[in-house]
């Protein structure tokens, strides 16, 4: 009797500790990011995390902590709508909270690392809650959460491409909302609000492709779980609420996407996916590439098999079908199914990188493992369970045989890391051990009455050992986090030389793509999937001799000793056997000037005319329609800068004749102008630049970025968030 009570107390303690443990395990997985000993501490490696996401987040933090909303940035692409770039995640609540909490330290690199790790904790917590609902068992839910959170997918490139990770982790909560809400008498219940919150947060996190994948899976699950009519009725208000919560981000982002080069991409641009060889990595992680997005661990693989054999009912069939379809789609053009989705599935043609569908493989397989474990736990002494476990010995046996074959192949080729068998052997030995231990654990469980706490504890320890070993070093560098925060020496040299005169830089692959956003330097290029289509055309078709002066380029960072335009080297640095040169162009080009003549040309012909040698681009501006005031030529006047802020420009103009004030600034919807306090039109000049018609005389010209769609979206979201809070308080849970 005493042993039974002790076992019950131990079980109750394990249940109470499940969520705290799941919250802490991601920190154990990433312990070297936060190690107390500086010699042990490192950082997320150089890549998308530092080049794009930290640069964006640092700029966002600086602007917000200064009491400014980052609608625009001059640090890349000669100016771009920063908030409208959805991967900036400018309005994502967890980001805003961490910016606030880290403000005393000025938003260091480790703050964004902390944000990433906390999202692994969210993934674990949400999957655990879903598992409790689906399986009614804390131990099964715990193992399911481990399998998804530390699967080869989430721990591979989503950690680098932070928006993918943060958009993906809301999937389990959205599925839980459907599971809880669609079966209740009142379809409009508290779970409707939870579903809208989950999808809205996923959208605000900043990766539209992942949001689309999450939405497709949630839609399919709702239609299956509630049958088409009831599932659609439940999901409709969920989608409306999600859109309203994220409207302030989604509306400007949709506009930017439609004006970007992404809107005109072809099938060939969007067809790439996982190599078919990656299927091998479901069994042999790290054997094809450094990352193994299809690997979920040996124990979950055995348990998923148990679900298919022992419990082939409705939920198992649904999740197996979801995983299979996603797996085929993840191969992109290598499997015909992607072509069908490209043709008929809304939104599919907008996104490349079909390997990201591995999310919809890892998540269903993790749930299948839960269903399989439930079947084994419920029938541990059943003959069918024992027969399955005995038969599943084929997996570790096959892996051991493969390890032996790889060993013989390596011996035949010579023991060298250059041999393909070398890495296959290492992977095969590891998974053979993991599979054998997993099989042995299941055999032990089904061989008689065993203490459940011991079984689930051993299973969790084994799964942690398996998945941590495969993934924990993939996104780690020994370089300290502080190194990601320091401005390169080339940037310091440019700043010291430039003074207060406005200038831009052409960076020829010597500095990180978004260094300008992070360190406050205006560059004509950057690193983001979204780029204004017209601007990209201009850079692709104009020779540098015309593009650089037109875009106010004064400095060129390159490996070239000499340039095509006269210049002077002001800085050089040798790193790793390569030399970086910073050139200052001898002839400084203006950031704004007055043009007194105009040529009317169509958009397709503008770039050809702009490249023509006989065009005096400082005197004659190219327009697509007649200017709103008469230009009669004559001498151009003078332009003086009075204020330069990302969303506000103030200039003093003096001219004896009517003129167009042309700014070496990208024109974009939302830029508005005032002359002496009176509204004035803003027109597109020279294919992509901004221009304001200015009558003769002395005038003060002000331009402000006030995007209409942002204002509309902000109103909707400002109403939706308090509405969500009130709804959670008053909506009945049935």
Image: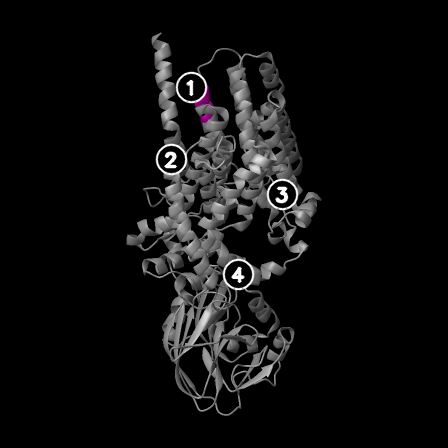
Q: Earlier in the sequence, mark 4 or mark 2?
A: 2
Q: CA distance from mark 4 to mark 3?
A: 27 Å
Taking the image as drawn, is residue 590 in sight?
no
- Quick check: 122 above or below 576? above
Name the residue tied to disc 2.
Answer: 24
Give residue 690's mark: none
Quarter of the image that includes the N terminus: top left
Magenta: main secondary structure equals helix
Q: Which quadrant, please, contains the C terminus?
A: top left
Whichever of callouts 2 and 1 sits on the residue coming sooner in the sequence is 2
Nearer the observer: mark 4 or 2; the answer is 4
Residues at discs 4 and 1 in contact (Cβ within 8 Å): no
Where is residue 572? Give x, y as percent.
45, 69
Which of discs 4 and 1 lies nearer the camera? The answer is 4
The alpha-carbon separation of the residues under discs 2 and 3 comes to 31 Å
Give 335 or 598, whichever is nearer the viewer. Answer: 598
């Amino acid at each position: 009797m005493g042993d039974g009570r002790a076992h019950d107390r131990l079980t109750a303690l394990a249940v109470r500790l499940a969520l705290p443990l799941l919250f802490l395990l991601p920190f154990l997985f990433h312990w070297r990011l936060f190690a107390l000993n500086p010699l042990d501490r490192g950082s997320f490696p150089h890549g998308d995390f530092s080049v794009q996401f930290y640069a964006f987040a640092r700029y966002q933090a600086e602007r917000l902590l200064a009491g400014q909303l980052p609608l625009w940035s001059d640090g890349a692409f000669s100016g771009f709508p920063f908030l409208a770039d959805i991967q900036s995640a400018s309005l994502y609540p967890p980001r805003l909270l961490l910016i606030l909490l880290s403000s005393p330290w000025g938003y260091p690199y480790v703050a964004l690392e902390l944000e990433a790790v906390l999202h692994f904790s969210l993934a674990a917590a949400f999957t655990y809650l879903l598992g409790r609902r689906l399986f009614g068992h804390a131990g099964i839910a715990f193992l399911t959460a481990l399998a998804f959170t530390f699967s080869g997918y989430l721990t591979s490139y989503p950690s680098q491409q932070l928006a993918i990770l943060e958009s993906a982790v809301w999937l389990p909560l959205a599925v839980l909302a459907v599971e809880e809400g669609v079966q209740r008498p009142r379809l409009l219940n508290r779970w409707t609000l939870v579903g809208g919150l989950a999808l809205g947060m996923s959208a605000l996190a900043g990766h539209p492709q992942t949001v689309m994948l999450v939405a497709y899976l949630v839609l399919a699950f709702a239609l299956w779980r509630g049958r088409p009519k009831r599932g659609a009725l439940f999901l409709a208000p969920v989608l409306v609420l999600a859109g309203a919560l994220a409207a302030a981000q989604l509306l400007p982002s949709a506009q930017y996407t439609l004006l970007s080069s992404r809107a005109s991409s072809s099938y060939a641009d969007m067809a790439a996916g996982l190599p078919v060889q990656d299927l091998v990595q479901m069994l042999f992680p790290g054997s094809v590439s450094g990352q193994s997005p299809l690997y979920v661990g040996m124990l979950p693989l055995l348990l998923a098999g148990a679900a298919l054999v022992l419990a082939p009912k409705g939920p198992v069939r649904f999740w197996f079908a979801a995983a299979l379809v996603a797996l085929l789609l993840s191969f992109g053009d290598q499997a015909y199914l992607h072509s069908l989705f490209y043709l008929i599935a809304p939104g599919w043609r907008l996104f490349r990188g079909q390997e990201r569908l591995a999310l919809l493989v890892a998540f269903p397989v993790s749930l299948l493992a839960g269903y399989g474990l439930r079947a084994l736990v419920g029938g541990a002494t059943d003959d069918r369970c024992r027969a399955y476990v005995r038969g599943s010995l084929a997996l570790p046996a096959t892996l051991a045989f493969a390890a032996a074959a790889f060993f013989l192949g390596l011996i035949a080729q010579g023991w060298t890391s250059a041999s393909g068998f070398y890495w296959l052997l290492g992977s095969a030995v590891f998974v053979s051990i993991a599979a054998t231990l997993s099989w042995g654990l299941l055999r032990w469980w089904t061989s008689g009455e065993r203490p459940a706490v011991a079984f689930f504890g051993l299973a969790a320890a084994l799964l942690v050992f398996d998945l941590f070993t495969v993934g924990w070093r993939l996104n780690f560098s020994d370089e300290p986090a502080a190194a990601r925060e320091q401005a390169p020496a080339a940037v310091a040299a440019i700043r010291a030389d430039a003074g207060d005169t406005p200038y831009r830089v052409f960076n020829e692959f010597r500095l990180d793509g978004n260094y300008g956003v992070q360190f406050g330097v205006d560059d004509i290029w950057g690193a983001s999937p979204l780029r204004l289509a017209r601007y990209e055309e201009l850079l692709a078709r104009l020779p540098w001799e015309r593009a650089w002066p037109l875009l106010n380029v004064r400095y060129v960072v390159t490996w070239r000793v000499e340039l095509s335009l006269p210049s002077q080297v002001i800085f050089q640095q040798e790193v790793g056997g390569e030399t970086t040169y910073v050139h200052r162009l001898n002839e400084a080009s203006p950031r704004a000037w007055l043009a007194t003549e105009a040529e009317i040309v169509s958009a397709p012909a503008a770039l050809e005319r702009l490249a023509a040698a006989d065009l005096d681009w400082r005197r004659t501006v190219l327009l697509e329609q007649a200017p709103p005031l008469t230009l009669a030529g004559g001498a151009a006047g003078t332009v003086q800068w009075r204020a330069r802020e990302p969303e506000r420009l103030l200039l003093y103009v003096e001219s004896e004749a009517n003129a167009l004030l042309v700014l070496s600034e990208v024109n974009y919807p939302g830029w508005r102008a005032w002359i002496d306090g009176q509204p004035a039109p803003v027109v597109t000049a020279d294919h992509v630049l901004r221009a304001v018609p200015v009558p003769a005389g002395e005038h003060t010209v002000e331009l402000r970025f006030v995007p209409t769609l942002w204002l509309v979206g902000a109103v909707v979201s400002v109403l939706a968030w308090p509405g969500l809070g009130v709804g959670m308080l008053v909506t009945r849970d049935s």
